[in-house]
Amino acid sequence: MRLLITGAGGMLGQEMQRAARRVTAGVDWRVAAFMREDLDVASQESIFSAIAMVSPQVIVNCAAYTNVDGCESEAETAYRMNGEVPGVLAKAARETGALLVHYSTDYVFDGRASTPYKEDHPVAPLSVYGRSKLAGEDAIRSGDARHLILRTQWLYGRHGRNFVDTILEKAAAGEQLKVVNDQFGAPTWARDLAVATLEAVALKLTGTFHAVNAGRCTWYDVALRAVTLAGMDPSLVTPTTTAEYPRPAQRPAWGVLDLSKLAEAGVTFRPWDEALEEYVTRERVASLDAAAGAEAGDKQK
Ligand SMILES: NC(=O)c1ccc[n+]([C@@H]2O[C@H](COP(=O)([O-])OP(=O)(O)OC[C@H]3O[C@@H](n4cnc5c(N)ncnc54)[C@H](OP(=O)(O)O)[C@@H]3O)[C@@H](O)[C@H]2O)c1
């Protein structure tokens, strides 16, 4: 199946490429991965010419403006990238008969619930990022392109800045870490999301689904678990509150997403702590070893 990936250089984009370059979900994917420099999704012309070149059956949009705090001061860019671009991609998908796969966020909710959010729970974003991502969902749903919108959260992975790596780097430097313990969600390995995406496409799913690693925790729980798994001193991590750690963008206190709709359709996620364990103890160690090996090789030259 021919797949076109936008934003292929990002954290999820790189994992999508990896998952689609092997047989995943029993499908032999043919991938055309476009980095930002090869396909600027802010340009309609650039989108249509890439699609004409590849003739994809599936367009996976991994491009977005993802700096949540930055969106507060750069609202115009946020609405263009996260709100309008998905509508243009949907138009291109409709005209070519392709399926559009797009990612959204738990930040479309206001976090006042106390049970996991189902897909049809009323939305009420608290930040520019959340409002811009919701605008993107609406732009896709208001057209008649075949689409799959996956709402995810707290992504981490090997490619790009993310919470897990930042915590581990700071802990390795012996820094004391105060981490918020009153926002709930589930850290999600971009690799698991990439595989789940291909499984959902193979099953021909369409519509809006929640897609995160299973279970729930706080950022503090994630930091403590990651530091412990990495064999570092857990007393470096102490809990704090959102009120004590103000940020430009307001985050929902409760972002727990209900996974039952996706599970009933045949796609399941493993628990967040299992995925995190594999990431910290195997994937990250392997990439650090590879980097150290490359550095040693450079020094010998
Ligand atoms: N990260 C999370 O925790 C999280 C949570 C919920 C939902 N999501 C959603 O998941 C999706 C993937 O996120 P991610 O974490 O992989 O983000 P990411 O690492 O920031 O990747 C986004 C990619 O989009 C590219 N991009 C930006 N503007 C572009 C343009 N005009 N044309 C083409 N590419 C452009 C970026 O390139 P540059 O690096 O050059 O700017 C980057 O490679 C996004 O839709 C995001 O909103 C993410």
Image: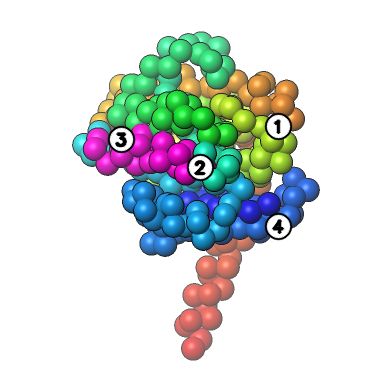
Residue 35, quarter of picture: bottom left
Between marks 3 and 4 in the image, the one whose residue lies nearer the viewer: 3
Q: Which residue carries the number 3 mark? A: 79
Assign a secondary structure to mark 2: helix
Residue 95 numbered tag: 2
Q: Which amino acid does label 3 sit on?
A: Tyr
Figure disc tally? 4
Q: How many residues crowd mark 3 within 10 Å: few (<14), some (14–19), many (20+)? A: many
Residue range of the region highlighted in magenta in the rendering: 75-93
Closer to the N terminus: mark 2 or mark 1? 2
Q: Which residue carries the number 1 mark? A: 268
Assign a secondary structure to mark 1: loop
Q: Residue furthest left?
A: 73
Question: What is the CA distance from the residue labelled 2 to the residue labelled 3?
Answer: 23 Å
Q: Do the residues labelled 2 and 1 touch (CB within 8 Å)?
A: no
Q: Which amino acid does label 4 sit on?
A: Arg
